[in-house]
Image (cartoon, rainbow, N blue to C red):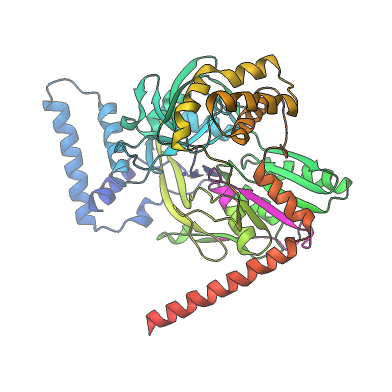
Amino acid sequence: MNNFYVYKKSVPLSFIWVMATAVLCGVFILVLVPGAEAQGREARTTTTQYVNQYTSIIQDVFDFIQRHYVDEVDAQTLYEGAMSGMFEALGDPYSSFLTEQDMLDLSDTTQGSFGGVGLYISPSDEQADGKTYIEVASPIEDTPGWRAGINPGDLIIKINDEPTDVLTMDEVLARLRGTPGQNVDLVIRRGEKLEFPVSLTRAIIEVPTTKYALIGEDIGYLKLLTFTPHTLERSKDAIAEFKKHNYKAFILDLRNNYGGLLNSAVDISDLFLEGGVVVSTKSRLPQENRVFSARRATEIPSTMPIIVLINRGSASASEIVAGALKDRGRAYLVGEKSFGKGSVQQVYPLNNTPTGFKITVARYYTPSDVNIDKIGIPPDREVLFPEFTDDDAEALNSLITANRIPNFIKEKPQASGDEIAALAQELNREYQLDESLLRRLIRNEQNRTSVALVYDLEYDVQLQEAVNILRSGTYNTLMQTTKTLKVLQEETTKEEEFAQAS
């Protein structure tokens, strides 16, 4: 779910051995393109001698295992094991062999619906205990994972009592996805000390696209949930509605947007930019070196103030949009540093089999020629939500286990601000937790289960800051300051490069 996916024409099985030779010698964005010939022959860098040598060795070992292993081994098992091993050898979490089920799941995803819990995930960094678990990059809104309160940055350390540090990404996906109506039991780690169980019931996950509304009478608010073939059309619907009300400013919310179609990201950027580069891709493969540009006409006036909201759940396609608008001086970014997913994958079905593979073929670069992979895009103004400390972990664990907040919302689904504040004060006395954090937890639970809000200006401090900037009259000054700083940084970089060259 977190990769650039490019579908290519089926690859003949002979290509597998070329791939094996390449390996032996040596993120979710979907990109849908017309069929093209497999690029194995073009990417081949080893000599025919070595290709034949390694191909022969692999075939010999394959045959030897089938003839001499103590137990009879299914050829498909060996084939899938060999394929998985080749891609694991790359050390790239976004490149992997795809089983028949993986290919079916991927097809479900691109069609817009599948059975699952609604979580975008990725491998985590190594933890203090020396293990690598699965990190939640972003929950999909209005899904079981989102309603259960799972947040970006949470670690899934167990699935149905099975530790995730011993599972591959594909194995984790296979356990999270499946028949709607069945339960999946998770253990979530939040921070260093807080761990708690979550039981989710799989549902049909329909990939949502946009939410939008006016803030007051003058600010158009558009939240992009993912980038699909319908995102541009839905976004234009939102802009048309804003125009009816003569809006004066625009907020583009890309928080927790973990990707989608590359072409959709370019199309959305095109709404704001008058020509020029949106994003470029670079690779050792010449055909993967591309520059995507905006058209000259824009849907939104070039003089309209725009603020883009980002956080650690903004990745891939959303980082393309945020990076383009930031680098081109078209928008002011507020929130937190983005995820940092800057690579491009292709998906290849394999001829005469129901299997395939996905492999990283390029990296993408913002208009200022920066690759943000594992770095992310910093906001122009950082605004963080209050975080719990390690000292809060035990109290939070007790609060979550007691189900005090969900029980309150079940009894009072339309609880007022005063009622939420009263409960926060009560919980503060009992659990010694910050009241602002408690109010946010209560409102988040209400939003997830009862009140379908497009935005929550009362408790969303990042959105509050965006609105304050637009209404305070400081937007133009901030943009000019940002542009000046960028020029100074570019001059400093050039001076450093000149000094190094000298």
Residue at 78% from the left image edge and 56% from the top image edge: 472
Residue at 66% from the left image edge and 68% from the top image edge: 481
Q: Position of residue 80 (x, y in %)?
A: 30, 32
Location of the C terminus (image quadrant) = bottom left
Determine whether 149 is above or below 25 in the image: above
Residue 147 visible in the snapshot: no
What secondary structure characterizes most of the magenta part?
loop
Residue at 65% from the left image edge and 46% from the top image edge: 462
User: Where does the magenta region start and end?
Assistant: 291-319
Q: Position of residue 270 (x, y in %)?
A: 69, 56
Front residue of 148/226: it is 148
Residue 120 visible in the snapshot: yes
Residue at 59% from the left image edge and 55% from the top image edge: 379
Determine whether 186 is above or below 474 in the image: above
Q: Quick check: is 455 in the magenta stretch?
A: no
**For residue 89, what is the image quadrant?**
top left
